Image (spheres, rainbow, N blue to C red):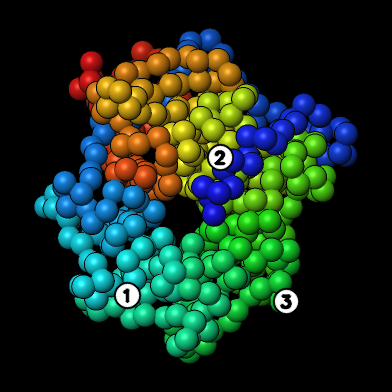
Amino acid sequence: MKSLFTATIWCMLTVASVPNSATGQEPAPKEATARPSGELKLPYVYTDWQQFTVKDGLPNDHIFAVEADGPRIWIGTEGGLACYDKRTGKFRSWKEEDGLPWRVVSSLDVDKKTGDLWIGLFGGGLARFSGGRFDHFHQLNSGLVNDVVYGVAVENNHVWAATTAGASRYNTVTKKWTIYTEKNSPMEEIWNYGVCYNKGKVYLGVWGSGVLEFDVATERWKDYLDPDGEMEIDLYRDDGIVHVITTGVSFVEDILWVSTYFGMSRYDGRHWRGIYAHETGLPSDFGNAVKGRSANEAWFATDKGVGVFADFPSDTWVTYTLDPKTRGGKAVISRDEKVLKTISLQRSIPHNYVLWVELDGDDVWVGTSKGLGWGKGAGYYSGLRPAKTVTSSEKNES
């Protein structure tokens, strides 16, 4: 669906010049647009990258999902499930002949209480990997609403599956299933792309329905749509989510980060911020996924590289891309539209079409259409530091 839809994206306009006063919205707080003064301050840059492909043990180079679980890194690919053990530096993989119920693994989440791995299968339903055994849930043997599962998330004793025909919620204790579609939730469309859970709320990214919030305690829904009512353009900036074609959601430190096919959004519970490539360090408005690290840092997986909103208060970005000719890459630090520094990388992300980002402590994992990248965060720091400060990884590259 994504590849078919791409052709229409560049034919549409993004209008972001109308001020908030036109919508009656309150302006964003002053600290949200603060700029560092005096000595130049820069964010941390990942310069130590390792790349993995089928040559290293992956079952397939097309990476859909990555899930960090302590020393284990679970990887969902187009050709099976893999696990990388950081202690040994080795991969183990599972294909259909090894018991995996379906070849294409599209999403992953680990139940921290039980250690079970929940696996979204693109066309094969949902699987649980526990004690070396796969349990398979699909339309014919469970309450799963559809077998094309884009996203999966563990919520207390429940597991959510975002599918192309709605969302399903499975109670692992009572074995009860609940299905959510346009009939019992505010879904204008039922094509669910992404799901996440944090602090008592589940967030669904829905193709054509923006973001839906489910309050676990009350089981009530709330929807986030573009209030100007225009499908093709963002008529009034920062009046709500930038677009209803939503691909990813990430809720961290009371901040909702959203990726769409037409730009990105940040919501603090009161103020929205629209994020576009033409005015920031975002490499492309075509977002496949998002992973928030904090209220001020988020990683956006796009079709033209990784865009990191490294420091929200100062609008500072780091963009990682690969040069396909040299197989090296670069990290570009920018503030608004101004490039502050460009760092050449001997090794960078494996490909510029990025499908997933996973944060692993100070490290980061990047899943692309042609391999997996591991950014090692030695000396990582959040926010900004004086430009003369050099991280240990930068010293190694200089």
Quarter of the image with the N terminus in it: bottom right
The count of marks equals 3
**Mark 3 vs mark 2: which is more N-terminal?**
3
Distance between the alpha carbons at the discs numbered 3 and 2: 30 Å
| Amino acid type at mark 1 | Pro
Residue beneath label 3, please? 183
- Which residue is at a point 69% across and 58% down the rendered structure image? 209
Q: Which of marks 3 and 1 is nearer the N terminus?
A: 1
Residues at circles 1 and 2 in contact by the CB criterion of under 8 Å? no
SS for dot 3: loop
The three-letter amino acid code for the residue at tag 2 is Phe
Placement of 336 over or under 303, stated as above or below: above
The residue most toward the left is 88
Q: Which of 185 and 354 is in front in this view?
A: 354
Mark 1 lies on residue? 101
Instruction: Assign a secondary structure to mark 1.
Output: loop
Residue at the spot of label 2: 286
Q: How crowded is mark 3: few (under 14 residues within 10 Å), some or many (20 or more)?
A: few
| Disc marking residue 207 | none
One can see residue 86 in this view: no
